[in-house]
Amino acid sequence: MRSIAAAETVAPKDVGFSAKRLGRLTDAFERDVAAGTIPGAVVHVARRGRTVYLRAFGYRDREAEAPMALDAIFRAASMTKPVVVVAALMLAEEGRLQLYHDLAQYLPEFAGVQVGIERGAGETRELDLVAPARPITVQDLMRHTSGLTYGAFGDSLVQRAYRAANVTDPRQNNAEMSAKLAALPLASQPGSTWEYSMSIDVLGRVVEVVSGLDLDRFIAERITGPLAMHDTAFRLPDADVARLAQPQIDPATGQRADLRYLYDPERPPRWITGGGGLLTTATDYARFAQLLAGGGVLEGTRLLGRSSVALMTADHLSPGIGYASWTPLLGINAPTPAMGQGFGLGVAVRTAPGRNPAPGSVGDWCWSGISGTYFWVDPAEALVAVLMLQAPLLRVHYRSLMRNLVYQALR
């Protein structure tokens, strides 16, 4: 199936791109759709604040033979996290929240949290509980150094406890989620280890407590509404369910990748998860990314001061920080010295040239979602790029492919 091209708002040569070499981006995605590798995608690239490339490829739902459209809605997954960080930073700018404060100041249930230390090996392991060396801070939540974890990405005794407590139950609310996590041990001492985790889910609860609004309402009123992100929300209206992009059936297994745990339109979740619940389009999310690229302002609407954006996109990891064992599975996103990256507040930040196998500039920042979504901002090149894709098993590959194909087209 051929791609559906939107009218480009600016000629590639006017913002330093080669139109011919941008064609390689088109060729690669069309080739992979035709080969059955992916169902479809939407790609949005802007430079100097102007859209230079916006195309929809393939199918929104291959099995239904429904073509992809530019306004297709995607499960953003963890690309929700930077939006929630911005929400918290807005409250910090209003003097209602402090990043250095103990988490328990906002969520008292965390005052008695303990750290789980494993003894033994295999099924004879036991968990000793010790006091934290210092409290969890709001900054720890934003940079994933809280000691929290994800229950699905390992089999430690703490992760088993997460699964037993059903901490990602779609029927819970954020207050119930927070109470569950506070009753469980931490996987590491606060501040000692970078571990991708439910930290931003907890941050979403902090936003609720400080603002007095449910997280979805705060984001709608304070972020997506002002930015005219009209197709971004935690719920799909019935009229828009048909716009939801779907993964395809894997020919090797005969099974469709199941993303209903992120959002099931037949059973919409009660839980407004700040870690991965947003639904959005490529053009909507590009507006959010352009807000950050613009230092907190978009088309005259300012949500953050430029100093807050600078803080968000600086490296917040201390020298000698530890890493969870599964961190390398994040591929080019991994915020490790080996990848030439650190981690800011909700985003990975490139800190060194070389090292990372994907092209970019020192100071660029990015994040992605397990469903296949990805975005990055490169201030040195005045570049914003968004990939919307629902192919979870291929997500690492397409992050790298997207970067390679965008950067090679720069003149």
Image (spheres, helix red, strand yellow):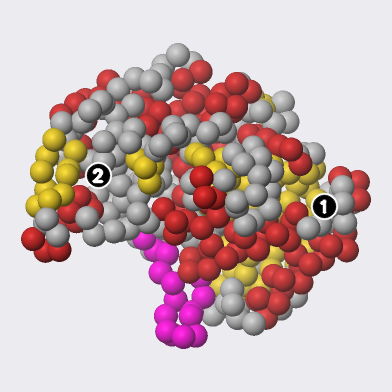
Position of residue 310 in the picture relative to residue 178 (left or right): right
- On residue 187, which mark appears? 2
Give the class, few, some or many, for how many residues have Cα within 10 Å of label 1's Cα (few <14, many ≥20).
some
- Image point 65% across, 76% down: which residue? 33
- Image point 69% across, 70% down: which residue? 29
The spot of residue 252 in percent (x, y) is: 46, 85
Whole-number angstrom distance, CA of label 2 to CA of label 1: 43 Å
- Front residue of this view, candidates 210 and 153: 153
Q: Kindly indicate the quadrant of the structure image that contains residue 138.
A: top left
Q: Secondary structure at mark 2?
A: loop
Is 306 included in the stretch rendered in magenta? no
Q: Secondary structure at mark 1?
A: loop
Position of residue 357 in the picture relative to residue 80 (left or right): right
The spot of residue 170 in percent (x, y) is: 30, 53
* Type of amino acid under label 2: Ala
In the image, residue 361 sits, relative to residue 327, either above or below, namely above
In the image, residue 25 sits, relative to residue 112, either above or below, namely below
The spot of residue 386 in percent (x, y) is: 65, 52
Q: Is residue 37 visible?
A: yes
* Type of amino acid under label 1: Leu
- Magenta region: which residues? 238-261
Position of residue 43 in the picture relative to residue 142 (left or right): right
- Front residue of this view, candidates 173 and 327: 327
Chain-order first, disc 2 or disc 1: 2
In the image, residue 359 sits, relative to residue 65, either above or below, namely above
Q: For the residues labelled 2 and 1, say whether their Cβ atoms are less than 8 Å apart.
A: no
User: Which residue in the protein does label 1 denote?
Assistant: 410
- Image point 73% across, 44% down: which residue? 383
The spot of residue 151 in percent (x, y) is: 27, 54
Is 245 included in the stretch rendered in magenta? yes
Q: Kindly indicate the quadrant of the structure image that contains residue 184.
A: top left
